[in-house]
């Protein structure tokens, strides 16, 4: 498949790029700063632009089969990148006739907060309150669109190895601060390109 990956310079985005290339896909990495992206490959192209710019996104989506987004706010605890990016991604995809998007959100956003353990809830409603509220806006826009979306809600992300051993469900039981590696999340996201199981559904993923 010909894929556009958003947030390719981030920790999870890098796993998406590497695993997509290893899986035989043609990848365009959409990045703000090309100097931060040092990966080279015969099936890799790099497009520079702002993920909140619908026109730039539309150009990068030309000829693509699907979009995978691992956009994040980095170390910021106050950001509107999620809602602003989705507001640009949806019309760009519609303009180019691209239907499939696998979008990385966060466990604790929206209705997934109800599944959280007590420890998780304290963390979510204090440090992450504003950024999760913005993510919820973006998620709602995707759900309201006519796109073939899958929303992915990982628990606390780690830099551990890809294990292939994790739980997936619309609801999962939680204890303490559940975790999952970015590598496993990337693998789950890429697996959705060949499956309709989580089409227009929300998937919570955790070990």
Image: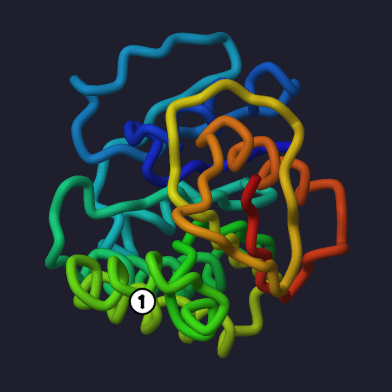
Q: In the shown orientation, is residue 48 left or right of residue 152? A: left
Disc 1, SS: helix
Residue at (30%, 21%) from the top-left corner?
37
Residue at (19%, 73%) from the top-left corner?
126
If the image is split into quadrants, where does the C terminus sit? top right
Q: How is the image coloured?
A: rainbow
- Would you name the residue on which mark 1 appears? 87
Residue at (66%, 72%) from the top-left corner?
202
Instruction: Kindly indicate the quadrant of the structure image that contains residue 115.
Output: bottom right
**42, above or below 150, in the image:** above
Q: Position of residue 198 (x, y in %)?
A: 78, 65
**187, above or below 85, in the image:** above
Q: In the shown orientation, is residue 39 left or right of residue 162? A: left
As rendered, which of 11 and 21 lies closer to the eye? 11
Q: Position of residue 121 (x, y in %)?
A: 37, 74
If the image is split into quadrants, where does the N terminus sit? top right
Query: Tag count in the figure?
Result: 1
Instruction: Kindly indicate the quadrant of the structure image that contains residue 47.
Output: top left
Q: In the shown orientation, is residue 138 left or right of residue 101? A: left
Instruction: Kindly indicate the quadrant of the structure image that contains residue 119.
Output: bottom left
**132, above or below 177, in the image:** below
Q: From this viewpoint, which residue is outermost toward the bottom?
A: 144
Residue at (13%, 55%) from the top-left corner?
76
**162, above or below 89, in the image:** above
Q: Position of residue 65 (x, y in %)?
A: 69, 49
> How packed is label 1: few (under 14 Cα within 10 Å), some, or many (20 or more)?
some
């Amino acid at each position: 498949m010909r894929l556009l990956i958003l947030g390719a310079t981030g920790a999870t985005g890098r796993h998406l790029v590497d695993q997509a290339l290893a899986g035989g896909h043609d990848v365009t990495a959409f990045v703000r700063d090309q100097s931060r992206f040092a990966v080279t490959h015969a099936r890799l192209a790099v497009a520079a632009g702002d993920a909140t710019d619908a026109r730039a996104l539309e150009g990068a989506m030309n000829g693509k089969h699907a979009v995978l987004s691992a956009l994040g706010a980095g170390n910021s605890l106050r950001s509107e990148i999620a809602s602003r990016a989705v507001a640009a991604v949806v019309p760009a995809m519609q303009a180019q006739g691209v239907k499939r998007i696998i979008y990385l959100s966060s466990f604790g956003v929206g209705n997934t907060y109800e599944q959280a353990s007590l420890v998780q809830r304290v963390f979510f409603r204090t440090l992450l309150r504003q950024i999760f509220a913005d993510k919820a806006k973006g998620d709602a826009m995707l759900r309201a669109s006519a796109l073939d979306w899958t929303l992915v809600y990982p628990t606390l992300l780690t830099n551990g190895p890809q294990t292939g051993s994790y739980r997936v469900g619309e609801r999962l039981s939680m204890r303490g601060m559940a975790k999952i590696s970015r590598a496993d999340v990337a693998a789950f996201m890429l697996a959705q390109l060949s499956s309709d199981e989580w089409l227009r559904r929300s998937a919570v993923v955790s070990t």
